[in-house]
Amino acid sequence: MTGWSISPFEADGLRVSPLRPPVLPEPPRHGEDPADCQSCRDRDEGIWFNDRWRLTRIAGVGVPLVLMLHPLEHHDMADLPDELAAELGVLSTHIVRHVQALPHVSRAHVYRIGDGGAHLHIWFFARPEGQAQLYGSWLPVWDDLLPEYPADVAEADAAVVADALVASAGGRRPAAAASLPLPIAD
Ligand SMILES: [Zn+2]
């Protein structure tokens, strides 16, 4: 992968980490117990809400915009009720559409990993227009390496996306849009 033109690393001098033995049972993820779940505690924070979901902007990132979609109730993806699973598909599609409509953004990458937190959270990473080095699967790595994207621009773009989501999928905006600090590593 370091030979790809999109790699943020030059191959010379990079070494592959030795593979460690598996750890069983695996340690619990953050929020396995809903009583200790940050996402449940933060259910009033976000830039867009409906009765089942909320959308947050992740601050302090290097790409133009990183958004995260969370169910209000404590579900992981595997136990998401079908009604919410169907809505997740619609909301994800609308969020991608609205992020990609931003004038300087070409793509919204969508990720669900879930190794860090037990409460479902879907990532949306905006890939800036024309920046071919940021194509593809290295984008979240580049995000950690790039200088911080201007927060005022990201906040305004997030507001555009949230307003468009209200128009296309319903829901509401909070009185004062809030953003979250970086969550635990996923
Ligand atoms: Zn939770």
Image: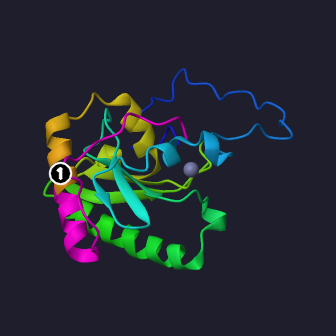
165 sits to left or right of 138? left
Give coordinates of residue 146: x percent, y percent. Answer: 32, 31
Please provide the residue range marked out in magenta.
160-186
Local packing at callout 1 (Cα closer than 10 Å; few below 14, some 14-19, many 20+) is some
Percent position of residue 43, x then y: 43, 50
Give the quadrant of residue 19. Answer: top right
Q: Residue at 58% of width from left, 56% of height from top?
A: 74
Disc 1 secondary structure class: helix
Whether the magenta-drawn stretch holds residue 56 is answered as no
Q: On the rendered structure, is 177 left or right of 92?
A: left
Give the x, y percent position of residue 181: 37, 34
Residue sitting at 44 percent across and 44 percent down?
42
Q: Which residue is drawn at 74% across and 27% down?
A: 18
Asked whether the viewer can see residue 144, the reply is yes
Q: Name the residue under label 1.
A: 157
Q: What is the magenta segment's predominant secondary structure?
A: loop
In the picture, measured across the screen, residue 182 lies left or right of residue 73, that is left
Q: Residue shown at 29%/49% (left/top)? A: 132
Task: State whether residue 44 is above or below residue 48.
Answer: above
Q: What residue type is labelled 1?
A: Asp
